[in-house]
Structure formats: C-alpha cells, structure tokens
Image (cartoon, rainbow, N blue to C red):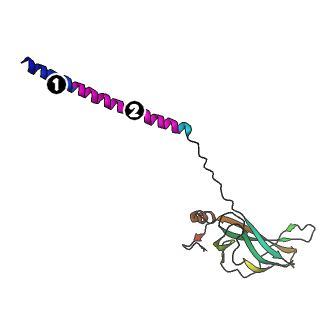
Amino acid sequence: MKNGKNELQNSQHENKRVLNKIQILILSLLVITTVTVGGTVAYLTTKTDSVVNTFEPSEVSCEVQEKFDGTHKKDINVKNTSDIEAYLRVKLVSYRVNDADPPQHIGGEAPINNFNLGADWVKIGDYYYYTKPVAANGGVPATPLTNSLELTSSYNDADGGRQVIEVMAEAIQSKPVEAVKQAWNVNISKSGEITE
C-alpha cells in the first residue's frame, strides 16, 4: 500500500512540476513579448524622423486685357493668372469725369451703351460671367467679353463731362463647385458651366 501511496504522491508531484514549468513558460513568453513590443515602440519613437507635411495654397488672380482708342474699348477679356483653373467674372463700372488735368469724377448718370456679348459669356445681376472654367497660368476665355464697347465722349446736359468705364475682374478657383455656387450665388450645370 505504501507503494501505491508513493506512486500517487509522485504522480501528483510530477503534475505540479509540469504545471509549474508551463506557468513559468507562459510567464516567460509574456515577459519576452512585453519587452519586445516595448523596445520596438521605444526604438521607433526615438529613431523615426518626423515627416513634414507641406501645404501650399493656390493663388487665385486675374488680369484685365483690353485696348482703348479714346472712344472704344476693344477686345475686353480676362487672363487667368492663377496657378489653378478658375471661373472669371467682370463688372463694368461706368461714371463721368470732367476735362480737368487730371480728370475728376463728377455727378450724373453714365449708362453703358448696348454691346454684343461674346460667346459663352452671360450677364447675371451686375456681373458678366464666363460660363466655363479657364485654364491656369495665363489661360483666357475663348472669346472676349465684347469686341467693342463705345464710350460716350461728351454729355450735353447740365453735368457734362465724358464717360469712363472701368473693367473690374474677379477669379475664383473652379473646385469645389459648391464653394463657387455659394461665393458667387450662381448655378453650375453638371457639365461645369455657370448658368442663370
């Protein structure tokens, strides 16, 4: 009976030793994993160079192109001087000046004479819009706003003077379209054209 009892004790003792070895093995694996992961994170944190994310905003600008012979403004157009595709619009500001040197702004209405609007230009409110986006870096609309705009050289009313028309242009990047719609309060078709 002593042998049976000894064998049972030996068997239990052997089971405890195996269990202890398994526990030590698991604990060792956990320690090794923790040290490896921690070391890797520490290494990457100290050895990885920072990355600079450079953001360069686009510059949106335009320039009026026109010829003036003293009584007519001709070939009125706008050059997209932006570094990004843009929509363009023009406002014609008309007023009277006297013949002083230099001319001075005077009162009186100075209505703009009728003129032929170029293809793909549309008037909405006080502005003339080129309906299509214009290419960056010097792109111009395919047709000018107008080929000829006659100015009144002399008024025969109490205010007198002569007409001056300033061509004022604006550009806005063509994308996102929703921003264009909101900023200029216009509609843009699915094909990308400004509409009334």
* The quarter of the displayed image where residue 182 is located: bottom right
Residue assigned mark 2: 32
| Quadrant showing the C terminus | bottom right
Label placed on residue 153: none
Task: Please tell me whether residue 107 is drawn above or below residue 55 in the rendered image.
Answer: below
The foreground one among 53 and 23 is 23
Task: Please tell me whether residue 61 is drawn above or below residue 158 in the rendered image.
Answer: above
Counting residues from the N terminus, which is met first, the one under dot 2 or under dot 1? 1
The foreground one among 39 and 115 is 39
Residue found at the very far left of the displayed protein? 1
The residue that appears at 58% across and 63% down in the rendered structure is 176
Separation of marks 2 and 1 at Cα, in angstroms? 31 Å
Q: Give the range drawn in magenta.
A: 16-44
Residue type, mark 1 in image: Ser
Q: Main secondary structure of the magenta part?
A: helix
Residue assigned mark 1: 11
Task: Please tell me whether residue 67 is drawn above or below residue 24 in the rendered image.
Answer: below
As helix, strand or loop, the secondary structure at mark 1 comes to helix
Residue type, mark 2 in image: Ile
Q: Where is residue 7 in the image (x, y as percent from the top left)?
A: 13, 22
